[in-house]
Amino acid sequence: MVSVDGSVPTRTPAHAPRGLAPTLAVLEYHLVDYRRTWRSSAVSSFVLPLLTMLGFGLGVGAYVTQGVGGVDYLDFLVPGLIASTALQVAVGESTWPVLGNFNWTRTYLAQAAAPLRVVDILGGHLAFVAVRVLTSSAAFLLVAALFGALHSAWALAILPLVVLIGLAVATPVFAYSAWVRTDSYLAILFRFAVIPMTLFAGVFFPVDSLPVGLRWAAYVSPLWHGVDLCRAATLGVAPQWSITGHLLYLGAWTVGGWLLARAVFRRRLVL
């Protein structure tokens, strides 16, 4: 039971069920809740990439007559947009929903009062974020295929890649959203992290054209590594950096973010 002040009574973790079943139950809860809003997000998943490619790929691309790096601007842009979409969906599902589950709806508190461990609550919600990232990116990939912007069978590798990109971003954002107490801090996250990352991580133009300071800031961001991998997959070329290095870097963000998020969730949910 959750007390009037919102605190969760102490319980012994050993009483919680083991295995993947509790995590899948939390995932099922989020999927059932998503049934009420999936139609609007499904429409936007197709309309947004369509408008983006028409506006940037064909509109702006018409003025980039020489292409970028030897390829048409649309072909250069599409993989960056797919990786950026994965980031934005991951951040969107990891900010206000997480803060709300602590402060407003108190869903996490109710789940913690049930025989669920912190890792079940966190893992189930992150699994839902991965599903949202995968479906949104798959819709973008389909629209890109209709525009003829995919030039290699390796483009299918983007589907597992976007899940990794999403988790590399979502796990630290989960920790941040669980740590802050008001949504004003979420606006700061978008203004000083998400927007600059989207603009300067190689989505719209090569990172090599940036000043040295901004270039290294782009290399540190997980989005650039995702963009480089997605661009290599759609074009069928080698990435600028090693594939193993990219995957290890994104994996490090995922593991580090998971450990941080688990610590913050545990502090707020277990007395």
Image (cartoon, rainbow, N blue to C red):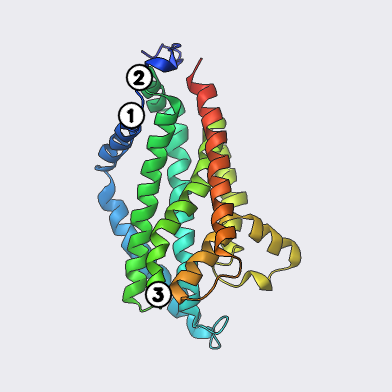
Residue 183 showing in the rendered view: no
Residue at far bottom of view: 65
Q: Position of residue 27 (x, y in %)?
A: 32, 37
- Mark 3 sits on what residue? 54
- Mark 1 sits on what residue? 22
Identify the residue shown where x is 59% and y is 63%: 201
Q: What amino acid is at disc 3? A: Leu
Identify the residue shown where x is 36% and y is 79%: 148
Which is nearer the N-term, disc 1 or disc 3? Answer: 1
Q: Is residue 174 above or below residue 89?
A: above
Identify the residue shown where x is 61% and y is 57%: 196
- Mark 2 sits on what residue? 115
Q: Is residue 213 above or below residue 269?
A: below
Q: Position of residue 84 (x, y in %)?
A: 49, 60
The label nearer to you, 1 versus 3, is: 1
Residue 155 showing in the rendered view: yes
Cβ–Cβ under 8 Å for marks 1 and 3: no
Which is nearer the N-term, disc 3 or disc 2? Answer: 3
Q: What amino acid is at disc 2? A: Pro
Q: Which quarter of the figure is the N terminus placed in? A: top left
The CA distance from mark 1 to mark 2 is 9 Å
Cβ–Cβ under 8 Å for marks 1 and 2: yes
Q: Position of residue 54 (x, y in %)?
A: 40, 75
